[in-house]
Image (spheres, rainbow, N blue to C red):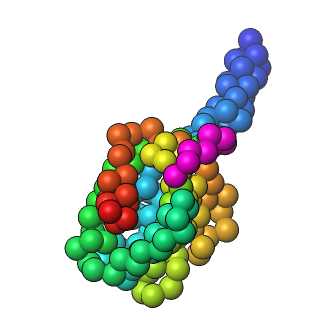
Amino acid sequence: MKKSKLFLLFLIVINLLLYGVPLYHSYNSFQNLVLDRIDATQITSIRVLKSSNEQEIKVDDPKEIEKIIHEFSDVKLKRSDASERPAETYWIRIYVNKDQRFGMTLYGTDYLYFSDRSSNSKYHSGNFKITSKFDGESITSLFK
């Protein structure tokens, strides 16, 4: 009887590890991916390239950088294949101390590809579906 309980407990632990860990890593946030790794005041510029006309905007005004980072700060993400590609795409590069640190591709307001150039971990890059309210106004307003 005691062996069967130990075996059952062992199976439960194995199942939690097999299914729980990947599920835990499938959810993320901009806060976790960027702001927990750097101090936002270290961001020296943000470059945004709009796909439809290949116009690039460089943002180096600290107030404008803060506005963009603030809009992204509450974004919640879920790992996704991001197979839907809207007509408008923005390539965003975040520079920390004048070196490119983060790269993002914003597909409309629904999907985001993210990479941290200083990390080789598979959990610090990938395609994500944006699961929280996000309208991208801080990015789209740069091109008006």
Is residue 102 or residue 22 the one in the foreground? Answer: 102
Q: Residue at x 45, y 46 (%)?
A: 109
Residue stretch in magenta: 81-88
**Residue 82 seen:** yes
Residue placed most toward the observer, 9 or 131:
131
Figure quadrant of the N terminus: top right
Residue 80 lies, in percent from the top left, at 62, 41
Residue lying at the far front of the rendered structure: 53
| 140 is higher (above) or lower (below) than 17 | below
Can you tell which quarter of the image residue 32 is in?
bottom left
Question: Most extreme residue toward the top, as rendered?
Answer: 1
Q: Quadrant of residue 98?
A: bottom left
Q: Is 68 positioned to the left or the right of 27 in the image?
A: left
Q: Is residue 73 visible in this depiction of the protein?
A: no
Total numbered labels placed on residues in the image: 0
User: In which image quadrant can residue 17 be found?
Assistant: top right
Q: Is residue 74 above or below residue 139?
A: above
